[in-house]
Each structure stands twice: as structure tokens, then as C-alpha cells.
Image (cartoon, coloured by chain):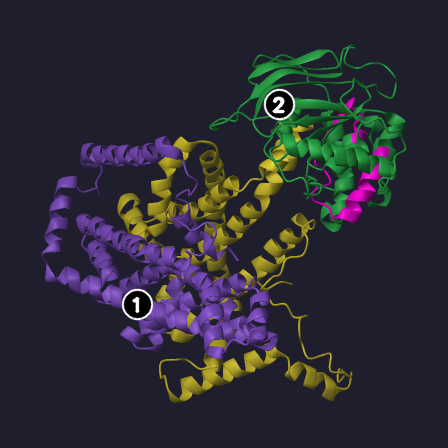
Amino acid sequence: MELETSRTRSGADPVSAAPFVSIESVGFTYPGARRPALTDTSLGIAKGEFACILGPSGCGKSTLLSILSGLAVPDTGRVSIDGEVLYDQGHAVAEHPPALGYVFQDPRLLPWRTVRQNLNLALKGAQVDRARWDELVDTYLGMCGLREYADVWPGKLSGGQRQRVAIARALAIEPPSVLMDEPFSTLDEVTARFMRQELLDLWEPIGQTIVFVTHSIREAVFLADHVFVMSAGPGRVLERRAIDIPRPRAYEDPHLAEIEGELVAWVLEQWGYHDATAGPTT
Amino acid sequence: MTIDTEARTPTTDGTRARTPRGIVRSVGTHPLVQSLVVTVAVWWGLSEWFFIFLPTPLEVGAAFVDAVTSAEFYADLVVTLRRVVLAWIGAMIIAVVLGIAMGRSWLIEAIAHPWVFVSLALPGPLVVLFSILALGLGELTTMVALLIVVTPFVVTFVYDATRALDSRLDEMSIVYQMTARDRVRHVFLPQMAPALMAGARFGFAMSWKLVVLVEALSSNVGIGERIQFFFVFNDPARVIAWTLTFTVVMVIVEVFGFQALDRRLFAWRPEAPHLFKT
Amino acid sequence: MAVDAVVRAEAATGRRDPGVLGRTRRPAVTVVMVGIVLILWAMLWDRTDFLPSPATTWDYGIGTLTEARTYHDLAATTRRLVLGLGIGYVGAVAVTLLMRRSGRWKLFFAPHVFVLISTPGLAMSLISLMIFGLSEIGIYLAVAGVVFPFVVVSLLEGMEGLDANLGEMTHVYHFSIRDRIRHQVVPEMAPYMFAAFRNVHALAWKIVVIAELFTQDDGIGWQYKRAFAFFEFERLIVWGGYFVGLVVLVEYGVLRPIERLVFRWRDNPPG
């Protein structure tokens, strides 16, 4: 399968329509670092799309998320979400950055507050009306199968459960876009499989724009509408691949495996590994 | 610190009958009871046959009862306790302000660090004597000396805690756009709480022990002064008895104060092994 | 338990690498401050009725260096520290090993540890010296008594985390008892034993001085008593300096190098 301009689920061509999440020629260097984390990175993500950013360690994919989430200001380039410019050439422009859901690699729940309180604090930050909090917490915890744990401390939950709470938190604020930074990479394989499917089930009815960072090719191919492949550091976007397999997708689908295999071979070459017999880097 | 009585007591061997014999046996073989009995026995032996100047357990017991039934004791206790509490509160306030300031500003840390370091190395008597020379004998001297000695210790607790803050939770709170107030209340303070608690406990224990020295040198009332008085007038039984009252007060404060507070504040923590716990 | 405040003091020198700028600016601040203190002292000393002049203090200090009495006192205090600390430490290790063997022993000694740890240093000194007739042994045991419970608590807490896995490995690979002790137990316990020692070192010095102040006629503590009784401020300052100097000397001259040795296999060796 070659590079082709892609079509989103809605059928519109996202590259020509104004992208929902737009990153243009962004560069960023961590203070004190010798090499830039990102150089001249550009990508556009359409509204309601599930986009995966795929790259090896150190390629700057987490940095991209930090920039989108407001944790870092890019040195160069322009970033906008939903038409609103967030950063332009090193300046933060937007006064009130949009509310975002963010799922980190580790759950990052406040261990001294109950699950419900953790979600409430996020709702407060997103300036959601207090009257709606209980309803939202119940709904989204329910969707993640954790409603009965609402008043429990995170210390009492398993790793997978905590990560699900983190996901519920990201969704509960009902943001237009959700950022996810390798959220399943610390879980065991079985739990991770389950969570990937559950994530898609949560996403389908609502259809937020999701930016999902991963280093697993299989995961990216399974989840995404488009995969943005980044180069090894310093980062740029090498290519944007469409995954045209209709949903719902099965993890064991041979079609999926075919795309994965082909992507793996291409990626190995791009990232500088030349052993043709090496297996997937999942 | 109190003793964990639930672990490994020999009540699981099935002889835990409600008969008098069963009760005596389970009590008698309890390590704490044995400890007490052995200690008293050894003490008695030593005082009878080896050390003439060591008072017998009976003598000490009598002096102890004497003390806790006398009005003067409680008057002295109140004086001492008041000094400890005031100095301790003062130390906590200074230490929290200074410790947090040190955590945020390298300059403040650079300035404060040598002072803290030296104060930690100074012996108590030196501080007290110098305070007396500078400020004369009096309540102020007592309090100042206590403050100078205790505060640096608590400062190290607070400062260490500011260095150990988890930046990952900070990032999360930024991303979810929590207000500054919420961040202090829900992210910063709960992380500081354990160190503040440990500092408070340590500071209290230290003040409590130190006040004896400070009073002995600089005051004419208080438990510390009494102990020194009994020493000068060669009454070892009283010295030991009044010292034991210290232990009693410590237990009370620890169990009913700090451990109770600890349980409430840190109920969310997953169980960690404890040396001594209720 | 919060025994490590004393260690924290030493550790609170900030081991994060501050970069070249940080490395010079922190000592610079210290130097500037010492300078300011000295200048203030020189300017204001005669406004107070207790501070001596820097000049007379300095002269007095230099004078002490040539007096035999000085070294006698320093030696006395040091001797008492070494013996008291030694006895207390060894006793604590022995009791800790016993306490680790079973919960019964733990409960058996728990009250002693608790009572001793809540006893004020002065009380311990006075009691001990009354029992032993104001003799040297009284001081050794006073210091030992104060130090003992802290070392026990420190060791027990530290050793909670010891690795049972290594024990299994040495068993499976049929290590001899000697080898087990030499290559597994001792290196494992060494950091905790060292940390426990460090914790109480400064405290022990202070107890010696307290005991000397109240009951002896030589040693640093005695010098304080004398200075106070005769209003000799220079003596007080100078001997205060001797004390701090001794503690710092041992800390940096003896303990830090040993620490580096003991901890060198760790991932982030100190220093």
C-alpha cells in the first residue's frame, strides 16, 4: 500500500479542509539540550479523527504532546486547535487555551483524593458547571466500568483500573480533543489489549479528536485513522499513512497484520535498522 | 511510638482458654510482660548487689507515686509543657516558612544553609549559656534557646520535602488547568504533609527532651529544673522517677496526638511496614 | 522514625548538580555572609555587654593552641565520645540482630528502646553518673544509653527492605557461611549500619558535652561551665568553635570518605 491522500470516516479530505489540530513547522529544543527535540514538524489532524503519532524513543513525540497540552512553548512555528492559534513563533497567543483531556503514561491520579474527587478537580479546571459534575462522573466512570469505585482511593485500585480512571477523567471533561501519551505501554499485554478495544468503544459514539502517541506499530495500525510516522530524533514527520480498514477492527485481522508488516519494513529502513529478518518492534 | 501487640503473640496455639489458668498463661508468656518482669528483676538484682547508688525499683516506684500525687509536680509540668508547646509551634512556623522559601529560591537556600548547618552542630549547652549571657535569666532566654536548637532540625525536614515534590503531578495539574489555589491545596500541601508531620513529631520529641537541659541551666521552675535539683541533692530515686514521667507524657502525646492525627490524615496511604504502631 | 534529621542536615548540602555557575555562586554567598558577620561583630561588639571583641577572641583562641590543658580537654572529650559511642553502637547492633530474629525479641526489647529514646540526654547523663559515682564509666554509659535506641530504630527501619532474594541465591549456589557473611550479609547491611552511625554521631558529641558540663572537671563541657561561671565570653566562643570544628572534622574527614567507600557500588554514589 503506498502513500495516498486519505479520507476520514466522514469522507472529507482533511488536508484541504482546515485541520482541527494544526501544527506548522514547529521546532523545539529543551533548555540545555544539545540537539533539538523537534525540527520543522508539521501535521494536520481532522476533526473527529483518531490520529496516531508513531516514532522511536527520543523522536520528540512526547514533546509534541507537551506542546499541544500547554506544557511547553515551541521555539518556532505555529500551533492551532479548532482554528484558534495557540502559539506563533515562540509566543503563547491564546488567552484561554481550550480544555483538553490528557492521559499520561502513568495514571497521575492524586493518591490522596478519591476517584470522584480527582475527576471533579479536572471538571473544575475545565470550568464545567458544578451542577453537572455528579452526572458526568457517573456516566464516564460507568462507561469505563468503574462506577462502584467512585469513592475509593486510587491506592486501592490496580494499575489497569487506575489508567481507566485516568481515561475517564480525560473524557469526563468532554473536551474537543484528547491527547494520549503511550497510555498502555506500562500495562501487561492482556490488559493493554482489553484497554485498546475499550478505548475504541468509548470513542466511537462520541467522536472526539484523539492524538495518540505510541511506539508500537501494531497498536497504531489497530487504533488509528491516520498514522503520522516520525523520524528518529530530532523529530519531524516523515509521512502520513491512512489506515483504510473499516471499523470495527479486530486485533487479529490478517489485513491489519499485512499493513503492519509492510509499515514495519518501511519504518525499519527509515529509522536506520537494516536487518530484514527483524520482527515487529512492538 | 507504641507497641504493636497484634503480631506474633502466642495466642494462636489454642490454649487461649478463658479459664484463669489460660489467661495467666497467655498473659505470662506475652513478650511484653516477660520484658517487664525480667527488667525489674535484673534491676533489682543490680541495685541490691552491685550498684549501691542505684535505687531499687521499689524506691523509684514510691518516688513516682509521690510525684504524680503532688500538686507541685503538676505545676511544674504545666510550666514545662507550656514552654515546649510554644517553642515547638514557633519552630514549626519558622521552619515551614524558611523551608519552603529555601525550596523555591537558591539564594535563600545558599544564605540559610550555613546557618542551619552550624546550628545543627552546636551543642545545646552552648546555645543556652550564650543566651543566658546575652539575655539574662528568664522566660525569654529559655524560649529563645529552645527555638534556636529545634528549628534547624525541622527546617531540614521541610526543605527535603520541597525537593522531593513530584513534578509529574504538577504537569497533570497544569494540563487540567487547575487554579493556583487548587494546586496548592490538592497537589502541593498533601505532598508536604508527611514531612511536616514527621518534622512536627520529631520537633516535639526534641523540644521535650531539650527543655530539661534548658530549664536545668536557666530556670527555677519546671520539671527540668527539679531533676537537676534532685541531682544536686543526691536523690537518684527522684531523678529517675521524674524522668519516667517524661516517658509517660511522650506516650500520651504520641498515641493520642500524633498517631491519631496520622491515621486521619494519611488514611489514603497503602500499608507500609511499621516498627511500632497501634 | 524521624531519626534522620541529623543526617539530613549533612545531606542538605544539595546533591543536585548546580552546574558551574551554581558551584561557584553558592560558596561565594557563604563567604560573603561570613564576611558580613565578622564585620558586624567587629562594629557592634562594644554596644552589647556580652560580646567580646573579635580581636581578643582571636588572641585567646591562638593562646589556647599552645596550652597543654587544651589538648587534655579535647582528648578527654574525644575519648569519652569514642568509648560511649562504641559501646552504644555495638550494643545496638547486637540487640537489633536479636530483634530481627523473631517478633518475640522485638517485643521484648521494644519497651527499653522506647523508654530510652524518650529520655532526655541530660536525665540520662545525671542518672548514669549518679549510679556510677561521677566516674568516667558513667559518661560512657550515658552516651551509650542515648545512642543505643536511635541506632536500633535506624537499623531496623533500614533493614526492613533487605533483599530476601539474595539470601535465596546464596542458598541455591551453596555459599559457605563465611562467604555468605562476607559477600552477602555484610555488604548489604553496611550502608544501613553506616547511616545509623552517621545519624547518632553528632548527637553523641552533644551528650558528652552535656555530661561533662554537669559532672566533670575536664573536657569541653567543663570549659563551658568555667566560661559561664567566670563570664569569660572569649572562652565560650573559642570552645564553641572547637566543638563545631571537631564534629565537622570527623564528619568530613572520616565519615564522608568511608561513606564513599561503603556506597560505591550503588547506582548514584554520593559525592
Q: Which residues are magenta?
A: A171-200
Q: Which residue is mark 1?
A: C82
Tell me which chain the residue with mark 2 is part of.
A
The percent position of residue B85, horizontal first and vertical second, equals: 50, 49
Q: Is residue B32 left or right of residue C21?
A: right
- In the rendered structure, the colour chosen for chain A is green
Q: Which chain is yellow?
A: B
Q: Secondary structure at mark 2?
A: loop
Q: Which residue is mark 2?
A: A236
Residue B272 quadrant: bottom right
Q: Is residue C182 left or right of residue A240?
A: left
- In the rendered structure, the colour chosen for chain C is purple
Q: Is residue B178 visible?
A: no
- Viewer-proximal residue, A218 or A87? A218
Q: Is residue C44 left or right of residue A184?
A: left
Q: Measure how far apart labels 2 and 1 are at the Cα level.
A: 65 Å
Amino acid on which disc 2 is placed: Arg
Residue drawn at x 31%, y 47% as measured from the top left? B131
